[in-house]
Image (cartoon, coloured by chain):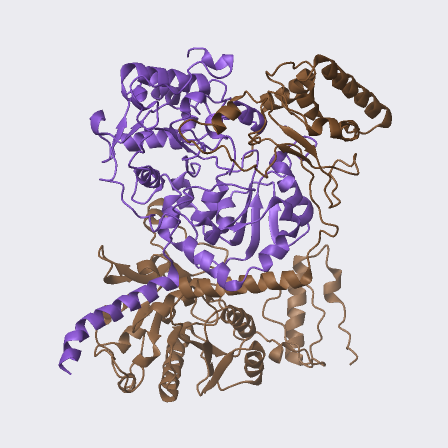
Chain colours: A purple, B brown
Amino acid sequence: MGTWGARAPPLAVAALLLLAVVVAAQDTERIEGSAGDVLEDDPVGRLKVYVYELPTKYNKKMVAKDSRCLSHMFAAEIFMHRFLLSSAIRTLNPEEADWFYTPVYTTCDLTPWGHPLPFKSPRIMRSAIQFISKRWPYWNRTEGADHFFVVPHDFGACFHYQEEKAIERGVLPLLRRATLVQTFGQKDHVCLKEGSITIPPYAPPQKMKTHLVPPETPRSIFVYFRGLFYDTANDPEGGYYARGARASVWENFKNNPLFDISTDHPPTYYEDMQRAVFCLCPLGWAPWSPRLVEAVVFGCIPVIIADDIVLPFADAIPWEEIGVFVAEDDVPKLDTILTSIPMEVILRKQRLLANPSMKQAMLFPQPAQPGDAFHQILNGLARKLPHGKDVFLKPGQKVLNWTEGPRGDLKPW
Amino acid sequence: MMKSLLPQSQLRRSSVATAARSAAGGDGSAADGGGGGAGAGAKAPASSTFWFLLHALCCLISLFLGFRFSRLLFFLLFSTTALYHSTTSSSSAAVLRATTTTTTTTTTTTTTTNTFTLSFAAANPPPSNPANRTALEAAAAGADKGGTSGNPQSHVVVGRHGIRIRPWPHPDPVEVMRAHQIMERVQEEQRRWYGVKEPRQVLVVTPTYSRAFQALHLTGLLHSLRNVPYPLTWIVVEAGGTTNATASLLARSGLTFVHIPFPDRMPHEWADRHATENRMRIHALRAIRERKMDGVVVFADDSNVHSMELFDEVQKVQWMGAVSVGILAHTGAAEQPRLSEEEKQNMPLPVQGPACNSSGHLAGWHTFNSLPFSGKTATVVGEAAPVLPKGLEWAGFVLNSRMLWKDAEGKPDWVKDLDAVGENGEEIENPLNLLNDPSSVEPLGNCGKKVLLWWLRVEARADSKFPQGWVIEPPLDVVVPAKRTPWPETTTELPSELLEDKQEQDDRRLSRANKSSRPRSTTKRQGKEN
């Protein structure tokens, strides 16, 4: 009886903890990826980033010329710069920095319709790298292996919107050793360099927050999608756009009442997503899209139709457990696939999506908040530390070929 | 990611045109399926002109036939073996293989009946391919990441794909059922997470009496109550005793109800009617106490309109709560009270409800301001004048039924015992009289900011006739016209002499007024055959 009294308090504490865990587990579940339970890690103290001071023609002047850069889906590069300037992991002493950041906005040359033109981006990037390699010794020390760049364009550092051209160009030769932070991700693709960090595209967090409906609004739409199925302007015959997957969705399910799909863009787009159980996220010209971010924020299970896609923060977020992956060949069977998912699996996915740290990891709020996409990027960079032996080059060793690439890229900017 | 880029489409067109011209690398790209010839096109200028001529030939054939003739057929017919071992162009770095898919697919442009999926292993060529000199290879053999030479070939191919359509693209009923079951379960889970944790029964107290508008009001209230997602009991107190009409309406409602008779008849004056209704409500509360009914008591007058949020909000009440009520003192008459601009500015909102101070506690009450209506309000039920509430209306209060029980756990001492109320014949004006301390009332609905129901009194004249139970049982043996009919002519028969005389008077008056157009007003009445 005496030992019982001694053991009672820890037992009570354990019982309380168990109760807390059980109660918490009812609503949300902790999210653990292949790298472990790292979504809520704090990067402060784990790495130091030095931000190069580039002339404003590489960053501020571009934004001043066209402020649409701040709200389109490629705005992550600008906001990352702003976040790093005032972050606690920034260091003003480059000698103690683990990573070096070059603030060059390569996706800010917009057409009148707001689409970024990538034709000058290789030259801009090259010019920036030439600048930092001449001003500071840190680039030549490692030929960029401890530098990271944010390249949120369609195919990342391949700098082209058309996939064949992008593959043909490949990753910019000067960036071959650097770490690329990009939205594009596809397995075994030229434009996804090994060691890259995939991030979600920028979606305006304030705009999404203003369209929230009460969470008890019943989800009465089974499958929801709004967007193009055929890109008649660029692919009039069909079969190219989205590798035919979007067209297949339309042809197979336009008459299916369970599928609320159309090309209309209604003003209640965000509210409708919150009333849907599944949201389709098919590939377009590139496999990624802001739809994934919207689906996660609004608690709609993303149905990802993009073969071999690499989703954002794939080592921190177990996407297999959160979204539904459908092969492009299986699109005609989409309704069978979705209705035959077991109920517990669907409820578990909704629980995972309801986890606030999941939603936070997909957003770029200003000012930055703990657990948001900025911090996930830093966590990803921190997980790559310490640098391997082959990062630092021996004196006189040269790896990169500065004259490589199409002739047009070599022109100064 | 969807875009519509004009320059891109131009690029495509120009690239097709230059496909033939692409010699050693450069910009020749595998722009479309037939342009896989670009891969071969780089082999030699001769073959590139060959493809150009082929393209021209296909265009001519298409013109002739009237639909687009795909070069894919030519490509496959003539080039399978040759291209199988193609060392690729330096430009696209692609190994071409033509495979036919087993699924029958149709493109939306119904030109080609068969489409073939061409696989372009464009991502990473096998390392054995020596002809590559592009950045592609350099990337694959990246110096810092040694050991990536064995890159597995990607299964995802760039280029034209067939659009897969299954033979019967229509919903399967079993799957539709399953989808609905999924949605039901998801919604149940949503309610469990975000909805009320332990829904309590709602006890709705409604005083009513038989009159022309009773069916209208009760039907509306009935439909509102049927939509309440919580267990509900409707306690209907009827003045003048229970009637069959009301009983049958309640029975058809599908709700759980308790029909309680009240011995007194409903008076015809508004003030007396208010008092009688109050007594009827107390009578209902006593019934709740006797039967020990458990739940939240909501006072729903039959002519009021309730929102669904009201019933969600009242689940939060601890002992006694107050909600904001929109007071609709409608003016049935054509004349509106003339208000000066200043009066219009200072006109308070027609809302009765709790008023909170900055810390969210009850500080007072908003009541309806009857000053603008002074002197012009209705005194008799059915009069065409604004009907105003008297003081605080019961509709704005909700109670926990345990407050009414003789003994209940945790019953606060600021609640009077129900038996002690009304003993000495005093009038219970509003539910605050049930309390010793009215400051303990909980304000609901975001501290009264949200108006959750509307108070309205719409009644017909007290002497209006209507068929009992709204079932017309012929014959109608007595038809009594109302004092003033809107129509000048009358076609009804009048059995009594008194009425006949009155009618003649009316006729004469009317004939004098409508000399020109109403000769019929003096026609004889004809006895109706039954």
**In the picture, residue B371 is in which quadrant?**
bottom left
Return the residue found at the far top. A411
Question: Which residue appears at 55% of the width and 43% of the height?
Answer: A266
The image quadrant where one finds the C terminus of chain A is top left
The image quadrant where one finds the N terminus of chain A is bottom left
Judging depth in this view, the residue of A389 and B26 nearest the camera is A389
Q: Where is residue B76 in the image (x, y as percent from the top left)?
A: 76, 31
Whether residue A170 sits left or right of residue B113 in the image: it is left
Q: Position of residue B101 (x, y in %)?
A: 72, 42
Q: Is residue B244 above or below residue B218?
A: below
Return the residue found at the far right. B64
Judging depth in this view, the residue of B205 and A241 nearest the camera is A241
Question: Which residue appears at 39% of the width and 83% of the height?
Answer: B293
**In the picture, residue B162 is in which quadrant?**
top right
Question: Which residue appears at 78% of the width and 37% of the height?
Answer: B110
Whether residue B1 sits left or right of residue B147 in the image: it is right
Q: Can residue A113 be seen in this view?
A: no
Judging depth in this view, the residue of B17 and B280 nearest the camera is B17
Question: Which residue appears at 47% of the width and 15% of the height?
Answer: A409
Q: Is residue B458 above or below residue B290?
A: above
Q: How many labels does the image show?
A: 0
Q: Where is residue B45 in the image (x, y as percent from the top left)?
A: 70, 13
Q: Is residue A397 above or below residue B471?
A: above
